[in-house]
Image (cartoon, rainbow, N blue to C red):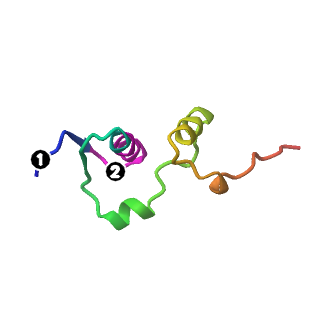
Amino acid sequence: MRTQVGIVGAGPAGLLLAHLLHREGVDSIVLEDRSRRYVEERVRAGLLEQGTTDVLERCGVAMREFYLPPLKCA
C-alpha cells in the first residue's frame, strides 16, 4: 500500500488530522496498535478546552448534542 501520509495513533489528534487531510484530497493511513473496538470505546479526554471545541466545530466534526452544559457552582 502506498499513501502520502502515515499517521501514528488513532487518538483525537490523529483522527482529526486524517479527516482534515481527506478533506484536502491527501491520502493518509492511520496506524494504531490497539483494536478498533478499544479505540472506539476508550475515553481519551475527560475534558475538552474551549479552543479544542472551536477547532472541532470549524472542521465540521463537533457534535454539540454530546456537550454537557457548564456546571453552576453555588
Label placed on residue 10: 2
Q: Which residue is drawn at 16% across and 44% down?
A: 3
Q: Which residue is drawn at 66% across and 51% down?
A: 67
Q: Where is residue 7 in the image (x, y as percent from the top left)?
A: 26, 42
Name the one closer to the observer, 3 or 6. Answer: 3
Residue range corresponding to the magenta coloring? 8-20
Q: Tell me where residue 20 sits by quadrant.
A: top left
Tell me: residue 28, above or below residue 50.
below
Of residues 74 and 64, which is closer to you in this image?
Answer: 64
Numbered disc 1: secondary structure: loop
Q: Which residue is drawn at 75% across and 49% down?
A: 69
Q: Give the mark, 1 or 2, whose residue is nearer the N terminus.
A: 1
Outermost residue toward the left in this view:
1
Q: Residue 35: x and y, percent?
A: 29, 64
From the viewer's perspective, is 13 left or right of 27? Answer: right
Q: Residue 37 carries which label?
A: none
> At 41% across and 62% down in the image, what residue appears?
40
- What's the CA distance linking mark 1 and mark 2? 19 Å
Residue 37 is drawn in which quadrant? bottom left
Residue for badge 1: 2
Relative image position of residue 26 (x, y in whole percent): 27, 40
Q: What type is the residue that disc 2 sits on?
A: Ala
In the image as oriented, which residue stretches furthest toward the front?
25
**In the image, what residue type sits under mark 1?**
Arg
Label the magenta part by its dominant secondary structure. Answer: helix
Residue 64 lies, in percent from the top left, at 64, 51
Residue 12 falls inside the magenta stretch: yes
- Which structural element holds mark 2? loop
